[in-house]
Amino acid sequence: MNTDDLLNQPLESVRDDGFSVGVVRRLCKAEQRMRFIIWGLLALGLAPFFAVLPFLDIGLDMGIALTPQTTQFLNNQVAYPLGVLVALFWVWKPRFSRL
Amino acid sequence: MNDAASAERRAAAGDVAAFGLLVRQHQSSLRGYLRRLTRGNHALADDLAQETFLEAYRKMAQFQGQGSFAGWLYAIAWSRFLMETRKRKLEPLDDADEGSGPQSDPHLKLDLEKALAMLRPPERSALTLCFALGMPHEEAAQVMNLPLGTLKSHVARGRAKLKTLLKDHAP
């Protein structure tokens, strides 16, 4: 057999023996670690804002500002029809329960 | 679209399971190639193969489908091997080790693997890519990031050395 014939022989087949599974497992771990780092850094970066900014007060202020408008809307537009619907449902409730 | 191309596309989109298919498909030839490069050091070859696949997954989006996926994978493996060689000083990449070949033991009976192990890494890689893996010279040159002429001279020089080694030490 000459040199070229020897060289042309295909590479010896290497049995997997869990190699592929190991690679995929390492890949998943690396992905998980990366995700953890990214979210960790994001949380770390945002932490000062949560600590410093008065989010609770903002929520309270918004609630106070919105409540009268909501109440007014309910009074004018929805309250009467809603009351009628509830009353009708109350009357027809036995029929619904029999169905 | 065939299964391999579909797996490549899904892997590029971050599908780990699809990438697992590609690993299973290419692990044997890639590990075989790296075993040759590392002169039969199976543990190191497998470490390098694993790193190659991990790097391939990270860079998967960069694989545009120009050229074969296998070629792209071998290119990563070759650069990983070179980095490892420099880091560990496994063997010099220049001609300094020439002469420390079979002459040191005239009774040594050589087989192909042993003879290849005596060549310089670029010659070993070029011969393996072009012969055992059947790659065209152009693709092998891309894998090794060399000009075509340089690759051809690695092939010619490696083959000539190999002929001498095998002839001198035939039983």
Image (spheres, grey):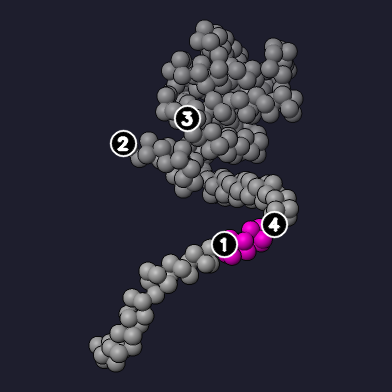
Q: Nearer the viewer, residue B66 or B151?
A: B66
In the picture, the disc for residue B1 is: 2
Looking at the rendered image, the disc whose residue lies closer to the viewer, 2 or 4, is 4
> Do the residues indicated by labels 3 and 1 lie within the same chain of the protein?
no
- Disc 3 versus disc 1: distance between alpha carbons? 55 Å
> Do the residues indicated by labels 4 and 1 lie within the same chain of the protein?
yes
**Label 1 residue SS:** helix
Magenta part, dominant SS:
helix
Identify which amino acid the numbered label 3 is placed on.
Answer: Phe
**Label 3 residue SS:** loop
Q: Position of residue B162 (x, y in %)?
A: 57, 15
Image quarter of residue B163: top right
If you read the primary sequence from the N terminus, does the residue marked by circle 4 or circle 1 appear first?
4
Instruction: Note whether residue B153 is visible.
Output: yes
- Identify the residue under disc 1: A65
Magenta stretch, residue numbers: A55-65
Residue at the spot 57% in from the left edge and 64% down from the top edge: A63
The chain holding disc 2 is B
Q: Is residue B138 left or right of residue B163?
A: left
Task: Count how many numbered circles sit on residues in the image.
Answer: 4
From the image, which quarter does the N terminus of chain B lie in? Answer: top left
Residue at the spot 42% in from the left edge and 28% down from the top edge: B65
Q: Are marks 2 and 4 in contact (CB under 8 Å)?
A: no
- Identify the residue under disc 3: B63
Image quarter of residue A56: bottom right
The chain holding disc 1 is A
Q: Is residue B63 left or right of residue A55?
A: left
- Disc 2 versus disc 3: distance between alpha carbons? 17 Å
Image quarter of residue B124: top right
Identify which amino acid the numbered label 4 is placed on.
Answer: Pro
- Disc 2 versus disc 4: distance between alpha carbons? 56 Å
- Disc 3 versus disc 4: distance between alpha carbons? 48 Å
